[in-house]
Image (cartoon, rainbow, N blue to C red):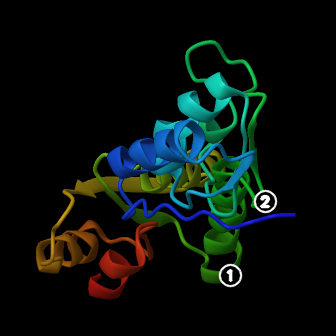
Amino acid sequence: KLSLVVADTKSEASEATNGMQKLISQDKVVAVIGPNQSSAVIASGAINNGAKVVDITPMGTNPDVTIDPKTKQVKPYSFRTCFIDPFQGTVLANFAKDNFSAKKAYVLTKLGDDYSAGLGHYFSKAFEELGGECVEETFPDGNSDFASYITSAKNSGADVVFAPTSTEAAALI
C-alpha cells in the first residue's frame, strides 16, 4: 500500500534540501519523485543518496543531477525521466543553425541556476562547434526588467536569442 507524502520545495535549492531531509528522516519515505528543478535536485541529492533512498526527477536536466561533479561517479539513487542538457543543447543548436540559418546567437541565462547555466553552456558549445558565434550574458535572480538584455541582443547582431530559464523569467523576456 502506498501513501503520498508531500514537501514543497518552493523551487529553491535550500527548501528542496530541507524537504528531502524531512521526507527521509521524519516521514520515512521509501522513494521520492521530484524535485523538478536541476538546482533543487542537485542540492538535495546528497541527502537521498546518503540515505539510499531513490529519487526520480521528472525535469532535472543538468548532468550533475545523476553524476557527482567532483568524483565523476554515478549517483546510485538519483534518476531522471527527461533528456539531459548536453542532448537538448545540441538539438537546439542544430535547430537554430538548420531552421533559422543562424550564424550568431545571443544566450541569456539566469545566474546561479544549474538548469539555465547548463543548457546555455551546452547550446553555446554545440552552436560554436557548428561554426556559429555566441554572445553570452547572465541575469540575476528576481530580475523583472529585461529591456537592457533585449537591447544587448539586438545590438550584438544575433540571429537568434536562446534564453533557457524559468517560466516566469521567460514570459518577461
Residue at mark 1: 99
The image quarter in which residue 127 lies: bottom right
Residue 121 in view here: no
Type of residue at label 2?
Answer: Thr
Q: Residue at x 68, y 60 (%)?
A: 88
Q: Position of residue 43 (x, y in %)?
A: 46, 38
> Crowding at label 1, few (<14), some or many (≥20) Cα neighbours within 10 Å?
few
Task: Write down the quadrant of residue 96 in the picture.
Answer: bottom right
How crowded pointer 2 is (Cα within 10 Å; few <14, some 14-19, many 20+) is rated as: few
* Position in image of residue 14 (x %, y %): 34, 45
**Given this view, does label 1 or label 2 mark the residue nearer the observer?**
2
At horizontal 39% and vertical 62% (from top left) the residue drawn is: 11
Number of numbered discs present?
Answer: 2
Closer to the camera in the image, 146 or 95: 146
Q: Is residue 106 above or below residue 38?
A: below
Observer-nearest of 142 and 161:
142
Q: Residue at x 52, y 65 (%)?
A: 103
Residue 104, image x, y percentages: 45, 64
- Confirm or deny contact between disc 1 and disc 2 (CB under 8 A): no
Q: Mark 1 belongs to which amino acid?
A: Asn
Residue 81: mark in rendering: 2
**Quarter of the image that includes the N terminus:** bottom right
Left or right side of 136 for 7: right
Q: Is residue 9 left or right of residue 157?
A: right
Q: Secondary structure at mark 2?
A: loop
| Mark 1 or mark 2, earlier in chain | 2
The residue sitting at 72% across, 36% down in the picture is 53
In the rendered view, tell whether residue 46 sits above or below residue 5: above
Query: In the displayed image of the protein, which residue is found farthest to the right?
Result: 1
